[in-house]
Image (cartoon, rainbow, N blue to C red):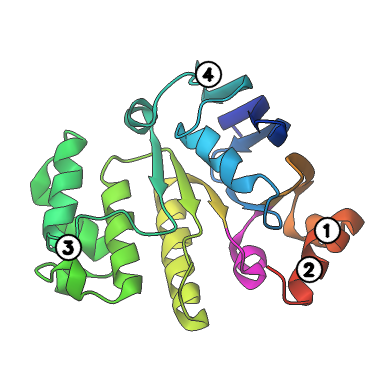
Amino acid sequence: MSTVLAADGISKSFGGLKAVDSVSFELAKGDIAALIGPNGAGKTTCFNLLGGALAADGGQMRLGPTDITGWPPHRRARAGIGRTFQIAATFRSMTALENAETALMAADAAPENASNLLDDVGIGALADTPVTALAYGDVKRVELAMVLASNPSLLLLDEPTAGMASNERLRIMELVTGLVRARGITVLFTEHDMDTVFGFATRILAMDQGQLIADGTPEAVRADRRVQQIYLGETESGDA
């Protein structure tokens, strides 16, 4: 399948700490990939390099055939990279519908499609509700609708289920995976909850100490001894 995103030796240091150390991987069209690792593994820094929030010290990133290494976040968004955040990035003073309309206008798309976006993420009935009055899971749905407004080819989801109860995590991930499969979108998400990772990812990339230590199917990564020792073992003992 065609490559949507490629990282080739990307690196980032903070002082003497190599937060991301020559990481390389490719994502194909339709991948739903999880980026995992213990705290301090470098996954958040890697995510910020891919989204453009941080500039890489070395290496190259490509979206399709295009080198996007030096591009800022807004240019990457225009090119087809959508991103959500651990703390939902919405306009809290607006209604759900106004948030979707604003996102569509920013993407040079028709704002009258905002209602359809909200229907797609399951909150059409809450269109006129202020974001401040929504349950947290519904706020995350508003953010998802805003990201989908630009019709991205790649979604970077930063802990999409953070702060949710287990039943709500299940619902939001079922929603996300259904939408991206229907639209042919490639996904990379970070997540601490291993039930979510192994329940929904078609591929898992594991990091430790700034390096990519495993990359494969959920079955292969679950069986990887280094992953078991470094990450899954810590999770089983309660340290996520």
- Is residue 202 part of the magenta span, yes or no? yes
Q: Are marks 2 and 4 in contact (CB under 8 Å)?
A: no
- Tell whether 32 sits left or right of 227: left
Point 25% across, 55% down: residue:
90
Residue, disc 1: 230
Q: Nearer the viewer, residue 164 or 219?
A: 164
Residue, disc 3: 96
Dot 4: element: loop
Q: Which mark is residue 24?
A: none
Give the amino acid type for the residue marked by disc 1 in the picture. Answer: Ile
Q: Nearer the viewer, mark 2 or mark 4?
A: 2
Alpha-carbon span between mark 2 and mark 4: 38 Å
**Crowdedness near tag 4: few (<14), some (14–19) or many (≥20) residues, C-alpha within 10 Å:** few
Q: Which residues are magenta?
A: 191-203
Residue 139 visible from this viewpoint: yes
Dot 1: element: helix
Alpha-carbon span between mark 4 and mark 1: 34 Å
The relative height of residue 202 versus residue 197 in the rendered view (above or below) is above
Alpha-carbon span between mark 3 and mark 2: 39 Å
Q: Nearer the viewer, mark 4 or mark 1?
A: 1
Point 35% across, 33% down: residue:
77
Q: Which mark is residue 65?
A: 4
Q: Are marks 2 and 1 in contact (CB under 8 Å)?
A: yes
**Crowdedness near tag 2: few (<14), some (14–19) or many (≥20) residues, C-alpha within 10 Å:** some
Based on the displayed image, in which of its 4 quarters is residue 98 positioned? bottom left
Residue reaching furthest to the right: 225
